[in-house]
Amino acid sequence: MGISRFVLLVFTISMLASPALSDLVLSKVDRRIYLTSHIVRISSTLEVENAGPETVSKVLLAFPDLQAQNLAYLMASPHEAKAKFKVSVVSFPIDVVKPEDMPPGVTFYSVSLPQGLTVGASFTFDVLAVFTHALRPMPEQIGQADIQLVLYQDSAYYLSPYVVKVQSLSLKLPDSRIESYTTLESTKVQGSEIKYGPYENLPAFSSSPITVHFQNNLPFTIAQELVREIEISHWGNVLVTEHYKLIHGGAQSKGEFSRLEPQARENVQGPSAVRYLVAHLPPRAHSVYYRDAIGNISTSHLRGDSKKAELLIEPRYPMFGGWRTAFTIGYGLPLQDCLYESEGRRFLNITFSSPVIELVIDTLIVKVVLPEGSSDISVAAPFFMKQCQETKISHLDIVGRPVVVLEKTNLVPEHNQYFQQWEEVRVAIQHVHNIICQCLATHDKLEASLRDLSRTGEVQACKAARKSTDGLLKELSKELKPLMTFLQSSPSAVQVLSKVEELVAKERELLEKLMAKHSTAVEAYDKKSGARDIESRIALQQQKITALRQEVDDLLEFIDEI
Amino acid sequence: MAAPEASTAAVPTLYTNNTLRNAFGGVLSFFILLLIGVLAFSIRLFSVIKYESVIHEFDPYFNYRVTQFLTKKGIYEFWNWFDDRTWYPLGRVIGGTVYPGLTLTAGTIWWLLNSLNIPLSVETVCVFTAPIFSAFASWATYLLTKEVKGAGAGLTSAVLLAMVPSYISRSVAGSYDNEAVAIFALIFTFYLYLKTLNTGSLFYATLNSLAYFYMVCSWGGYTFIINLIPMHVLLCIVTGRYSSRLYIAYAPLVVLGTLLAALVPVVGFNAVMTSEHFASFLVFIIIHVVAFVYYIKGILSPKMFKVAVTLVVTVGLAVCCAVIAVLIALVASSPTKGWSGRSLSLLDPTYASKYIPIIASVSEHQPPTWPSYFMDINVLAFLVPAGIIACFLPLSDASSFVVLYIATSVYFSGVMVRLMLVLAPAACITSGIALSEAFDVLTGSIKFQLPGVTSNAEVDAGETSSDTSEAQTDEVKAEKPDDTSKNRPLKKSKKKERELAENPPAKATAKAKAKAKAEKKRLLALPLEASVISLLLLVVLGAFYVVHSVWAAAEAYSAPSIVLTTRSHDGLHVFDDFREAYAWLSHNTDVNDKVASWWDYGYQTTAMANRTVIVDNNTWNNTHIATVGTAMSSPERAAWEIFHSLDVKYVLVVFGGLIGYPSDDINKFLWMVRIGGGVFPHIKEPDYLRDGQYRIDSQATPTMLNCLMYKLSYYRFVETDGKAYDRVRRTEIGKKYFKLTHFEEVFTTHHWMVRIYKLKPLKNRIRGKAKKSKLKTSSTSSSKRSGTKKKNPWQ
C-alpha cells in the first residue's frame, strides 16, 4: 500500500511538473543515502549555477510530503571534500517555504546562500537530510531467530524544481545481503552498495521510484518519549535525569519465545533484538545511576576517563520487535563544566538531546530547573521548539524553582547540539538605567553652570563646563549602544524594550533642548543682552525642558520597578 | 577523710551532690539513648548499602502499594478502596481488611516531609520506616525496663533490643511490614500499662488505651496484649496484690481500648464478638467483683463480712454457672469455636496442619527449630533464666508482668517461628535486667573488696565493662569521695530514695525492702578475683552478642529476596530475574491482562508488574487458592479450561532448576496439591507421590509428569544442557521431551527463574485435542479432565 501510494505520488509529481521556476540550474548532484542504521541519512552535494539574468540568493530544496513527514533534520553547509555527515560549524539558514505554482505533495525548503549568486556563477554546497521511520520492516512479523528485512523507497532521480544536468545516487546498505532492488538503466551493485546513474539533463521534478529490500539487523531503538530534567544547583552540581520510554521499532516479534536462542547466539551477528544501548555521557560525569520504577538495574558498565564517559546499559530483558521498556538514567556534572558567566549574566551551555547513540526520539521534553530566585530567563537554541515555563518545588524551597520546559518532536542524534540558557536580562536593563541617571546628572551640571552664569556672569567657565559635559555624554551614549543592541536581540526583554527605547529617545530630546537653551543663554551673555531679555528667551525652552524631564523621570521610575 | 562533725552538715551537701549526680546521670543516659537510637537505625541499613533502597519480600510490596494509593488518593478513598486488580474476579475490599497502622504512619511521614518541601518518594519513606521505628522501639524498651528495674537495666535492655537479630530480621530497611511498627507499639503499650500500674495515674491509663489503639491499627498480634494484660491482672488478684492502681491500669484499658479497637474496620465487632477478646471481659468482671469485695470488707465488720461472703458466693456461683453455660453454648455453636485459624493453631499447635493446609504451608507459621533460637536471640537465651530470677528479687507488680510476658512468649514462639518476634523484646528486657543486676553485684563487690584502691581503677573497670552499665558506674564514681565507713548507710538512704521515687505508694514496704537489699549486698560480696573474671566473661558474652548481631544484620537478614546474589570465584553474580519478569509483564502485556501464579507472587505481581492476579498473599479465600492449586496440578487441557474460565491470559511459574534456587514452585507443589485437594477431592496427594516420596525423576508418577506445573517448569529444559539435570532436586528429570498444546512460552528470564506462558486462544483447541490423542497422556488424565470439568467452580 505504502509503496504504491509513494509511486503514485512520485508519478503525479512528474506529470504535473511545470517548467523550471527560475533560472537556476543544478549542474551536478551527487547523492549518497546511508541505510546503515534505522536512521536514514541522505547527504547530497549540489552544484548550483545561475543561468538567469538576475542575482539569486536562495535555492529551493524539494522533498515529497511522505518523506518530509519523516524529515527530522535538514542542514546545508559549504561543500567540504571529506565531510561525511558531520554537523558542521557553518550552516546556512533554511526556511520552509510555499512558493506558488508548484505541484502539490511536495514540501519546499529554501536555503539562503551566504552571498548572492551572480549571473553565470556557480556554488557548491552540501545538504544533509536525516529521516526517521523511513525504513519499513518487510515482513512485518518475524520469529525470534529470523533476520530482519526492511524496505526503503526513494526516487532514483533527484527531486528538484530545477533542471539537473548530471546526477548520481549511491545507497549504502549495512550488509551485502540484498533481497531485491529496482533495476534501472545503469544500476550497479558493489558489495553492500547500490549505485544509480549517472543520469544527465533531466527536467525539473523528474523522478523514478526505486525500492530496495535488504537485511538490516541493527536494533531499531526508538524513544517514544524522553523527559530530560536538568537541575542546576547552587552547590556546584548539575543533575541530569533522563526518563526513557523505549520501543523496538523493527519487525514485530511473533511465535514462541525461547531463552535458548538469545543465549546461544549471543556472539553471532543474529537477530535484531536490542541487547544494550551505549550512551556517551559528558566527560567528568559522576554519580551515574540506571534504574526503573521497581529498582536498580544491575546490568550496566561505565567506562571513562577525563575526556569521555561511556555508559553501556542493558535493559532488563533483550528487546525483540515491538517490545517496550522504560527506565531512568541520571548523572551529575560539575557546575563549572556547563555554567558560564558573561556580562553579569550566567548561562548554561548543555547538550539538548539524549546521549544515547543512534536513538530516534519521537517526543523530547527538556526541563531546565534553575536555582530558586533566578529571573529573566531566556533560551538560545539552534532550532525551533515549543517553550513554556513552570515552577517546581524541591528540597526546602519556599517559592519554588523556575523551570523552562522545551518540547520537540522527531529527533535524531544530529540534534544533540548545545543550547544556552540565559538567566539575567535584568543586569542589562539596570545598566541602561544607570547610564540614563548619569546623563541626567550631567544635565544637572549644565543647569548649574547656567545658574552660575546668571549669578557671576563668567561666560568662559560656563563654556568649559559645556565642553566637559559634552565629552561625558558622548562616552555614555557609546556605552549605551551595545546594551541596546543586546536588549533588542534578547527575547525576554521584549516587554521592557519599548519603554527603554522610549526612555533613551526622551533623554536625547531633553539633551537637545537643554543644549539649545544653554547655547542661547551663553550667546545672550556673549551679546551682553539684558537679564530680562534672556529670561524671556529661555522661559519657553525651560517649559519644554521641565515637561520632558518629568517624563524621563516617570520612565526611569517605571523601569526601576521592573 | 570526712570529719565526724560533718555528719549533720553532710545532709544538705549530700542532697546537692545527689541532684548534681542525677542531673549528670540524666544527661548521660539521654546521650546513651540517642546513640542507641542511632545504632538501632544504622544496623538496619546493611540492606541498603549492600543491595539497594528497595522494598523487600512479599507482604511489604502490598503495604507499599497501599501506601502509594493512600498518598495519591487520600484517606477517604483509601478507606473505601475496593481493589479489583487482585483476587480476580472477586476483588478485595482493602480498606476494610487491612491493618492500617503502618500505611497511615508512613503516609503521615511522607505527607509531613512533603509539606516541608522535602520531596522524598513514597518508596524511600517506606524503606526507612522500619529502621526509624526500631529506634523508637529500643527507647520504649528503655522506658519499660526502667519501670521494672531502674535506668541501668533500661539502658542495657535498650541496647540489646537495638540489635537483637530476631527483630532485625523483620525491620531491616526495606522490610516494610506491619511488624516494623507493631513491635514498637507492643512495647510502648506494655510500658504505659506498667507506668499506670506503678503510678495509678489516669493520665497514663488513657495514654495506654491510645497506644493499644495504635497497636490494634498496626498488627493482628494485638490479641497478645489483650490476653496478656488480663492474665497479669488475674495473677495479681490471685496473689493478693490487688490495689486501686491495678484497677486504674486495667479497667480503662478494657473499656476505652475495646471502643477504640472497634473503630478499626478490620477489627470492628470482632473486638467484642470473638473468643480472643473474651478473657479480657472475664477478667474485667472479676476485677470489679474483687474491687467490690474489698470495698465491702472495708465497711463491714469481719463477722458480717463472712456472712456476706457465704451469701454472695452461693448466689454468685449460680449466676456464674448460668452465664458460663450460655457463653459456652454460644461459642460452641460456631465451627471454629469463635477463634480464628491462626489463634487456634497457637492453642493447639497441630490444628493447622490437620485442618488448614494454607496456614501450615507458610514457612513462618512452622514451629521453630532449636538452632533458630540461637540464631535469633543468641546469648539472650542463656541470660533469660537469670533475668527471670532477678525479677523475683524482689517481685513487684511490674517484674511479675515481665515474668508472665517472657513465659507466654516463649510458648508462642515455640508454636510459630514468626512469633519469635514477640519473644525478642521480652528476652531483651529480662536479659537486660540480668546483665544489669550482675554488673551491679560484681562492681558492688569489687568496690566492697577494694576500699583503699584509688577511685580511678574502679571507674575504669566499670567503664570498660559496658557503656550500658555506666549508670551504675556513675553511682560508684559519685560515692567515692565519701568515707567508706559512711558508705553503707549512705547507700541505704540512696536506695531508699530510689525505691521511693519508683514506688511512691509502696512507701511502707520500701523501707523494709531497702534494708533487706543492703543486707543482701553485704552477703553477696564475692571474692575480688571471681568478680573481676566474671565481669570480663560478661563483657566477652556481650561482645559475642554484638558480633553475632552485626553478622546477622549484614549477612543473614539483609537480602531483599527479590534480588539474589552469589559469590563465586569470578566475582559477584546477581540474579535479578524476578524484576526482569515483572518489568516484562508491565511493559509488554495489556494493562488489563490477568496473570495466574501461585499465591506467593500475587503481591509482587500487582505491585511491580501492575497486573491483575487471581490469588495473592492475603489468603482470605481458600477455595480460590484451591482452584489455582487444582489448575497447577491438573493436566494441560484441564488446567487450560480452569484458567480460561478465570479469564487468565498469562501463567507465571518460578523455576529454580537451572541455577539451584530452592524455593521454587516445584518444591512448593505438594502444597498446591494439598490445598487443591482439600476443596476438589479429585486431586489426590498419593497420585503425585511414588511410595510416599515426592520425586520428579523417571520414577515419578505419570500424574506428576503430566501436570501443568511440571510441564511449565521443565518445558525445553533439556535443551540447556542436553541432560535436563535439575540442580535443586539433584536429579535428571523424568520426562524430558514434550510439547505444549494449550500454552505458549512468551518469556523466560535470564536464569530461567521465572517463566511466563500465554494461554493459546480458543481456536487451537481442536488441534490441541488431536495432538493430545497422539501424545501418551494416558487414560487417567482424560478421566481427570472430565472430573475437573464438572467440579470447576468457574463454569
Image (cartoon, rainbow, N blue to C red):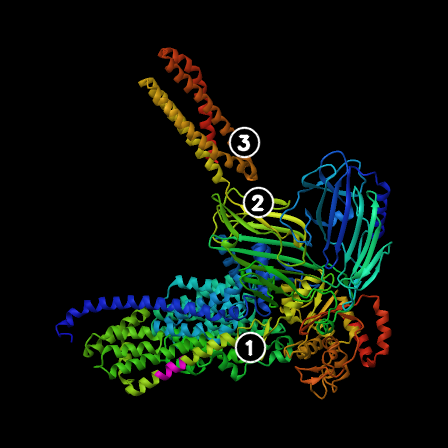
**Cα gap from disc 3 to disc 1, whole angstroms:** 84 Å
Horizontal placement of A160 versus B168: left or right?
A: right
Q: Give residue A265's position: percent from left, percent from top.
A: 72, 72
Q: What residue type is labelled 2?
A: Val
Q: Which of B410 and A338 is in front in this view?
A: A338
Residue B164 place in picture, x, y as percent: 46, 75
Residue where numbered disc 3 is placed: A498
Would residue B540 be counted in the magenta stretch?
Answer: yes
**Subunit under mark 3:** A
Span of residues in magenta: B536-542
Q: Distance between the residues labelled 3 and 2?
A: 21 Å
Among the 4 quarters of the image, the one containing residue A293? bottom right
Q: Does the magenta stretch include residue B309?
A: no
Q: Look at label 3 and name its amino acid.
A: Ser
Q: Where is residue B388 in the image (x, y as percent from the top left)?
A: 40, 80
Q: Are marks 3 and 1 on the same chain?
A: no
The residue under label 1 is B346
Residue A105 in view, yes or no: yes
Mark 2, residue position: A379
Q: What amino acid type should be assigned to the residue bearing mark 1?
A: Leu
Please state the horizontal and vertical placement of residue A174, each as a whole percent of the image: 75, 62
